[in-house]
Image: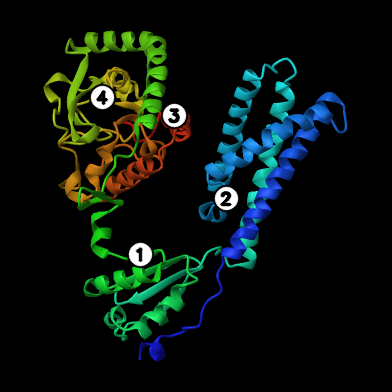
Amino acid sequence: MLRQKLPDSKPRTSKEDLRIRLYLFQGLGDIAVVLGSFLLAGGLYMGQWPSHFALAMSYAYIPLFVIMSVYQRSYSIPALYDVRYAVGRATLALVTSALLCFVVIFYAQANEKFSRVMFSMALVSSWMGISVIRWITHELIEKYYSGAASNVLIVHDGGPHVEVKGAQYMSTEDLPVHLARYEPESLDVFGRLFRTMDRVIVSCSVERRLDWAEILRAAGVRGEVVSQSLEELGALALERENGWVSVVISTGPLGLRDRFIKRIMDVAITIPALILLSPIMLITAVAIKLEDGGPIFFVQERMGRSNCLFKMLKFRSMSVGDLDVRGDRSTSRTDSRVTRVGSFIRKTSIDELPQLINVLRSEMSIVGPRPHALGSQAGDKLFWEIHSDYWQRHSLKPGLTGLAQVRGFRGATETEGHLTDRLTADLEYIRNWSPMGDIRIMLATARVLIHPNAY
């Protein structure tokens, strides 16, 4: 019988009580910190210990903060595992409840009595204290509960290997799992194994998926079945609509809000930059024209966002007869095609300045993966022939500078490794995009404007 063969069929201890205790510790600690912060701010600012006005403010603020903390998932399983997530959720709760408090004060016409300085001091102090509580909680879980605040069971049944920190493991490779759908005794064993679990992950063969799906549903547990085929597709989620199910494999790296923020940053930087750099650009244009009388700009088709072509602008740095429209040949350190003016503007990155116009036209961004020439090669292969993920770098607008550039990946791509290094950095940038990340890359770009590989 299945009851006799299943390993470790004893009921496990639920960790729900642990999480409840941790949530209470955090919640009561948060309230104590906020109350103490208002009293401290009132004492320091108003010289009263305790300050009745500070107490009154805290009584108005704390209920709003508790409600927003629950709403922002400040007390949740992810917040127990990830300190950064926990502090971020708590910060949102602090800020949103402060905004609500301002609205209440405004409509109550209590502006004259309200002290912005004291309130700000209390908020900063509260944030510091709550952050410490989140760190203490995380350390307690790591030290006394092996980093696991929830019960996770991984069942290996012929599928790919799966690991989760703090999880328990069970193997049923030789057991007749398909019988559990029909035998009450077998279902009883699985039910007892899963009853205290917060999450059950089953890694099984394709043939067993339906059996396990029925078992997990019947057990009333959060059940997951690992799918290697969905992993290969890069599945992100499932969507159900009108009786059919689809697999979400891409969503675009940035939502509307993030794209708006990035565009505002681009415009805010590009317009002043064009004004400030216009003398340098004018001098460069005149120098190029005087040297050989050819066109000032070099216009080349590059691949932009969503794999759409656009015409990228550069100051011309090569002689007119040697222009490489497709970029089939990488520029070398002693390239005879480069003019005297061209050599200087390439070394100082001045040749890239016209791309500010591309940014203004929304074809490029200040920061993003650098756009490559269509004929660019590493070794004797086109870039997209080297790595299957190459086209994914175009899910964002190309940039004047990027993570690959500030890491020193510039110049000719003589080997496949040169392309792989740049691609890895580009995909990392896309995955982890943030406004602060763009600002850090812009600041770091100043160090590589003049670079040994800029030729």
The quadrant in which the C terminus is found is: top left
Give the label, 3 or 1, closer to the camera.
1
- Among the two numbered marks 1 and 2 on one chain, the one whose residue lies closer to the N terminus: 2
State the image coordinates of residue 223 (x, y, percent, origin top left): 38, 65
Rendered position, 282 above or below 141: above
Badge 1 marks a residue whose secondary structure is: strand
Read off the residue under disc 2: 75
Q: In terms of sequence position, does the residue under pointer 2 or pointer 3 come before the other?
A: 2
Whether label 3 touches label 1, CB < 8 Å: no
Residue, disc 4:
363
Q: How is the image coloured?
A: rainbow
- Residue occupying the point 41% across, 91% down: 4
- Distance in Å between CA atoms under marks 2 and 4: 43 Å
Amino acid on which disc 2 is placed: Tyr
Q: Amino acid at mark 1?
A: Glu
Q: Residue 176 location in percent, x, y? A: 29, 85
Label 1 vs label 2: CA separation?
Answer: 24 Å
Left/right of residue 293 with respect to residue 174 in the rendered view? left
Asked if residue 156 shows in the view, the reply is yes
Give the distance between the C-alpha atoms of the residues marked 3 and 1, in whole angstroms. 42 Å
Label 4: state its secondary structure: loop
Residue 224, numbered circle: 1
Q: CA distance from mark 2 to mark 3?
A: 36 Å
Kindly give the residue lying farthest to the front in the view shown: 184
**Residue 320, image x and y in percent?**
14, 19
Residue designated by label 3: 442
Out of 206 and 331, give the one closest to the viewer.
Answer: 206
Label 2–label 3 contact, CB within 8 A: no
Between circles 2 and 3, the one closer to the viewer is: 2
